[in-house]
Image (spheres, rainbow, N blue to C red):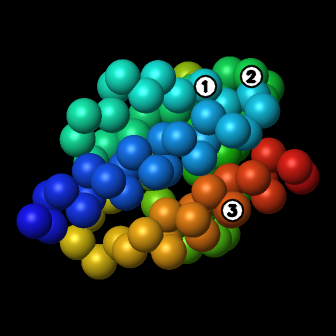
Amino acid sequence: ERLEEDHKNARILGEGLTDISGIKVDLETIPTNMVYFDLQGLGMDTYQFLPKLAEYNILGSPRPPSKVRLVTHYGISEDDIYTTIKAIKEIVKN
């Protein structure tokens, strides 16, 4: 049951990221609780992006040079997913 919620949250996250200009997400690669996305369209690499994300208390894993991995798991709610999407939109906007 918990794993199903994690997968649902990953799908919500992936779909939310596809709406952000400059970020590329292949929704076919989200069969689990891991979301990989590419920043190449932003002109920013993982090492520029991840510290900005950490300012929102959101941690991601680098997949250099331009990919990031986010993982949904126990303790991360659907509200947290929407907060993450909002934070990434703010980073991209600034």
Q: Which residue is mark 3?
A: 87
* Labels 2 and 3: the sequence-earlier one: 2
Identify the image quadrant of residue 23. top right
Total marks in image: 3
- Crowd rating for badge 2 (residues with CA inside 10 Å; few <14, some 14–19, many 20+): few
Q: Tag 2: residue type?
A: Gly
Residue depicted at 57% across the width and 65% down the height: 82
- Left or right of 60, for residue 88: right
Q: Which one is nearer the viewer's eye here, 33 or 12? A: 12
The reply to whether residue 4 is visible in this rendering is: yes
Q: CA distance from mark 1 to mark 3?
A: 16 Å
Looking at this rendering, what residue extends furthest in the right direction?
94
Nearest to N terminus: mark 2 or mark 1: 1
Q: Which residue is mark 1?
A: 24
| Mark pair 2, 1: CA separation | 8 Å
Q: Are marks 2 and 1 in contact (CB under 8 Å)?
A: yes
Give the number of the mark in front: 2 or 1. Answer: 1
Q: Secondary structure at mark 2?
A: helix
Within-10-Å neighbours for mark 1: few <14, some 14–19, many 20+: some
Q: Callout 3, which amino acid?
A: Ala
What element does badge 1 sit on? Answer: loop
Query: Mark 3: few, some, or many residues within 10 Å (few <14, many ≥20)?
Result: some
- Image quadrant occupied by the N terminus: bottom left
Q: Secondary structure at mark 3?
A: helix
Of the two numbered discs 1 and 3 on the same chain, state the one appearing first in sequence: 1
Amino acid type of the residue that numbered disc 1 sits on in the rendered structure? Lys
From the top left corner, tell me how far across and down residue 59 is, in percent.
47, 60
Q: How far apart are the alpha carbons under marks 2 and 3?
A: 18 Å
Which image quadrant for residue 11? top left
Residue appearing at x 14%, y 58% in the figure: 3
Which residue carries the number 2 mark?
41
Is residue 62 in sight in this rendering?
no
